[in-house]
Every structure is written in C-alpha cells, then in structure tokens.
Image (cartoon, rainbow, N blue to C red):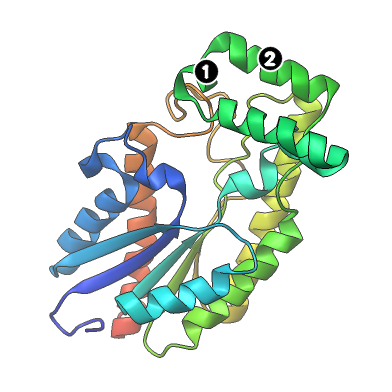
Amino acid sequence: MGPGGGALLRVLKLGTSDDLTAAIPEEDRAHRVTQRFLGDATGLPVEVISRVIWPGPKLPGLIDQWLDRYEPDLVLLVVNPYWMTFESVPLRLQRRLGWAGKAAGDMGTRVAGVPWLAYNPVFRAGRRFALKTIGGDVHFEPAEVVAVVEQCARRVLRREGIGLVFRGPRNALTYHNDAAGRARGERRRRETHIALARLAMELHAGYVGSDSPALAFDDANAFRGDFVHTTTREHRERGLIEGRALLDAWRELAGGSPG
C-alpha cells in the first residue's frame, strides 16, 4: 500500500554488491540502516529489498520484472562509481588482445577477487605498477551510464504512485591510480553526477549527489583494505543519507512537504 495507507512501506534498492557483503554485519549494512531510519520517521513497518545491478542492456527489463514482483512504494537507484571510474588492467587486456587478452584478463579478475590478495599491500603495489605500465579501461563511460539509468528511471515512473530517488557516485575509485588517473576518475565521477542531477530534475525524481567527492580516495576509515569496498562506518553514513532522501520522496507522494 502506498504512502499514508498505514500498511507496509516497501523500498526497492537497486544497489551494489557492497550492500550485501558478508564482511559487514547484517544490521549495519546500508539498506538495513535505511530501513530502521524510515520506520522510525514514518511510524510504518518498512521493508527494504536490495538488489545488485549492472548497467548493461538487460537492466531495464530486469527492473520491470522486479517492479512486478515486489510492487514497491519507493525505488532507490544507486549509480556505482565502479562502473565509470575504476580503471581495470584485466579489462584493458580483454579489449585489446582478443582471446589471449581475455584469458589473461579473466585470470587477473579472479585473482583480484580473492580477499586476502586484494587487501595485501604487495598486491596493491603490483596493481598500481600494472596501471602505470599497461593502463586500465573503465567498464562504461559516463554518457553510457546515464543513458541506461534514464531508461530504467522511465520504466519506474511508468508505474503510477512510485517515488524514485537517484544516488549519484559519492567518490571515484582511484586508490591504485597515480595523480593523473585520480584526476581522470574524478572528471568521470563529476560528469556523471552533473548529468544525473539534470536528469532527476527533468523527471521530477529525488537526487542525492555532490559536486565534490564525499570521500577521499585513500580514506581508510571509509574503505576496507582493497580501497573499493566500504567499512561499517560508511555503510551507516550512506544508509542515513539514502534514508533521508527516501523520506522526502515518501512525504511528497503522501502530499506533505520534504524535510
């Protein structure tokens, strides 16, 4: 039932794998923080359903399926900085060397996904050296990300009575880059943020974003050892930020004023 109906308030969060990581206690994960915040603020039972998304061509159709399945009152669409700021050496090898590059790239991706290696200072130094000598590619350019997000947003807004909030990328994932690479990452992050803010205004959707990075690339209090995934502190902070934006969207749907 929608806002003001006194029944369950259901939120569909379209987020990242970091939302569901086993390294963070369940109660401290961002979507659980959001769930508690909304429950306290609205006085309603709240359910936040978290799903991981990737901005490929199948995503809009997948979102249609989730909308049918979960019938949410609110949708939070998180734009992951990994998509457009993380420069990957394995991805460059795959794209430039064909079959041989794919084999090497697949191996590199698997190795990077092993926690004890990804968190190891020697491995991180090796990744930094590889980026400097080989270079890395991003998975998507900002315009590609925004185009897919727009398709998804329009799928959501076709459904009457659903509130939509975007969260832009809070930071660029550039710990392993040199200064030039960090600057490239921040340019991509900011380009994405600006385009998303304009899109949200055009679609009358909520938006959470920042002209400047919300996190330093080397903030050890926000990032875990691989400097990609985030800490409990950051989950809690992010959950509150997202909860406030969703509360504003809920109040607008209910006919009240934000804030």
Asked which secondary structure carries label 2, the reply is helix
Q: Position of residue 137 (x, y in %)?
A: 77, 40
In which quadrant of the rendered image does the C terminus lie? Answer: bottom left
Residue at 57 percent across and 31 percent down: it is 110
Residue 191's x, y, as percent? Answer: 73, 54
Q: How many marks?
A: 2
Secondary structure at badge 1 equals helix
Question: Which residue is at the front of the view, 78 or 215?
Answer: 78
Q: Which residue is mark 1?
A: 117
Instruction: Give percent across and percent down for residue 87.
Output: 72, 36
Quarter that holds the N terminus: bottom left
Horizontally, residue 140 falls left or right of residue 65, namely right
Horizontal placement of 133 versus 253: left or right? Answer: right
Q: Which mark is residue 134?
A: none
Q: Amino acid at mark 2?
A: Gly
Q: Amino acid at mark 1?
A: Leu
Q: Residue at x 53, y 35 (%)?
A: 215
Asked if 106 appears above or below 53 in the picture, the reply is: above
Q: Residues within 10 Å of mark 1 (few under 14, many from 20)?
A: some
The quadrant where residue 199 appears: bottom right
Residue 98 percent coordinates (x, y): 84, 42
Q: Residue at x 60, y 44 (%)?
A: 82
Q: Which residue is mark 2?
A: 126
Identity of the residue drawn at 26% across and 40% down = 28
Q: Earlier in the sequence, mark 1 or mark 2?
A: 1
